[in-house]
Amino acid sequence: MSGNTEKGQFDNKVVSWVDERLPIFTMLSKEYGVFPTPKNFNYFWNFGAIAMAMLSIMILTGIFLAMNYTAHADEAFNSVERITRDVNYGWLLRYLHMNGASFFFIAVYIHIGRGLFYGSYKGPRELLWIFGVLIFLLMMGTAFMGYTLPWSQMSGWGATVITNLFSAIPIVGDSIHTLLIGGFTVDNPTLNRFFALHYLLPFVIVAVVFLHVWALHVTGSNNPLGIEPKSKKDTLPFHPYYTSKDVFGLSVFLLFYLWVVFFHPLALSHADHFKPFDSMVTPEHIVPEWYFLPFYAILKSFTADLVIPFTGIILVEAKLLGVLAMFGSIGLLFVLPWLDSSPVRSATFRPIYKICLFLLLISMLVLGYTGSQPAEGWVVVAAQITTAYYFIHFLVILPLLGKIERTKPLPKSINESVLAKKEGK
Amino acid sequence: MSKTEKIDENKRDFLYLAAAGMGVVGVGSAVWPLVDSMNPAADVLALASTEVDLSSVEIGQSIKVVWRGKPVFIRRRTKEEITEANSVEVETLRDKQSDTDRVQNPEWLIMVGVCTHLGCIPLGNKPAEVKGEYNGWFCPCHGSHYDTSGRIRKGPAPKNLEVPEYKFVTDTQVIIG
């Protein structure tokens, strides 16, 4: 596959024979061999490939873990302990899988952050972005259900709290809640269905990743300048330039991942995750995994009902408000391409947007911290302020900023900018 | 169909709608068994009621019993706690209920020990546990405070702690459910 684009021009006869009947090698060569890719990528462009590698690791380790796991309320906790202690390399599989979830989210959060900074969600890449948000949602569902499988105190109570979110829906909420957990409380039926779905959803993610990448290959990649490639001078073939860069980036990322797996496998875990589930005792302090904390903080920051002033008539209960805000905070991402009114993609040329985005990052970090703390005192206020900023950023700042911001002049082409940078040094 | 024959568009539309409607009904009735299979099964629904002997419970003491997989709090309230529960202006409450609506015998407060916010189990049954700002129960998950009648007073929970159906068989025997 050395740059052949026309069908059937492969040196190997077997490859040619197959390709004439199913042009899979032509497709691979076109999409991953000669595929023209902007030549000015920075290392933030590694994280799509890294996320895909993490997805593969999760599926692979997950399949082998499932071979030793028992999805029953009485057995699940012990079967996970048995995997850790008795199954050959079971400890490795488990630690790769449980820390893999965290590193999958690290990769995806950086990937999303890059999209926000460089305006990758803007036309013509709206659908590409939407598939991405869909993958993120599916990941959240899969990770949540995976967390319940060891049937620990954190598992059972996490499942209780999250499924109870649906009981906030007016009128049908309780029926939906009962339908989801298959009983009056979180119990064996809940564990069984969560296991079934936890096994299914990763393959749904694979399907949506396929659509995500397909859409990417229709529009082509965005780049740090946010301007479209105009000539051949602006691009490089994907192979070997970006295959090698992705392998390098992935290797560095895997080093961090394996360092945690081998030296600090429980650093991201909680003590209550190692006690069997007791449906009669809630742990003193329950928190979700770190990657859910900002959204959990948004949920907790709604402490008062929405009432019509001076009448005491409750329009929306605090509980429902929190749930709506939490789902809304992710729902907003789906319409982000239409909220941002600026025609300029990259934050490099948008001085005010850059500051606002930095504030959003700070808000997410504050939300993450407050989400991990008991809801008392200043923690609540901090969570409320940052929650307010999150929604103001997307619903007020982004639509207005495009109309008032003076952007810096865009370079004529990627090639010109790259050469100018080189000469500047 | 010969060329001279005219197509009656209304008839066509009706046929399309009828076919699509039938299709929706068909798919719906095929999908329903799948959805309903996720609802509680017969054995889950068949959970019996719970009978509790209260003779060993002292005044001021609380116990926790299991009913349908959920904890039920039974507190033998002190005179002060009963007075406190009755002294509240019902109109000022989030979920307006007087104490008398929540008990059969004021001394015995019986309710489901599941926070109406997101389903955690509030603290306050054991002497050493925090009871919250209203001297009743406190949910550690998201900070809901309940008073000595189990009514929501502060925090995110929308409703009072649920009072299950129960019946005193004798003075110290109660059947829940």
Image: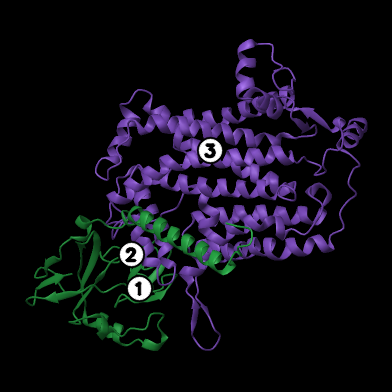
Q: Which mark is residue A206?
A: 3
Callout 1 environment at 10 Å: few (<14), some (14 to 19), or many (20+)?
A: many
Q: Colour of chain B?
A: green
Whole-angstrom CA distance, mark 2 to mark 3, is 41 Å
Please name which of the two marks, 2 or 3, marks the residue nearer to the observer.
3
Q: Which quadrant of the rendered structure holds the N terminus of chain A?
A: top right
Is residue A248 visible in this depiction of the protein? no
Residue at disc 2, secondary structure: loop
The amino acid on which the numbered mark 2 sits, given as a three-letter code, is Pro
The answer to whether A38 appears left or right of B34 in the picture is right
Compared with B174, A405 (above or below) is above
Which chain does the numbered disc 2 sit on?
B
Specify which label sits upstream in the sequence, 2 or 1: 2
Disc 2 residue crowd, few under 14, some 14–19, many 20+, Cα 10 Å: many
Q: Which residue is mark 2?
A: B122
Residue count near mark 3 (Cα–Cα under 10 Å), binned few <14, some 14–19, many ≥20? some
Which labelled disc corresponds to residue B146? 1
Marks 2/1 in contact by CB < 8 Å: the verdict is yes
Q: Is residue A81 above or below residue A329?
A: above
In the picture provided, is A158 more to the left or to the right than A371? left
Residue A42 in the image: state x and y as whole percent: 75, 35
What residue is shown at x 52% (from left), y 31% (from top)? A56
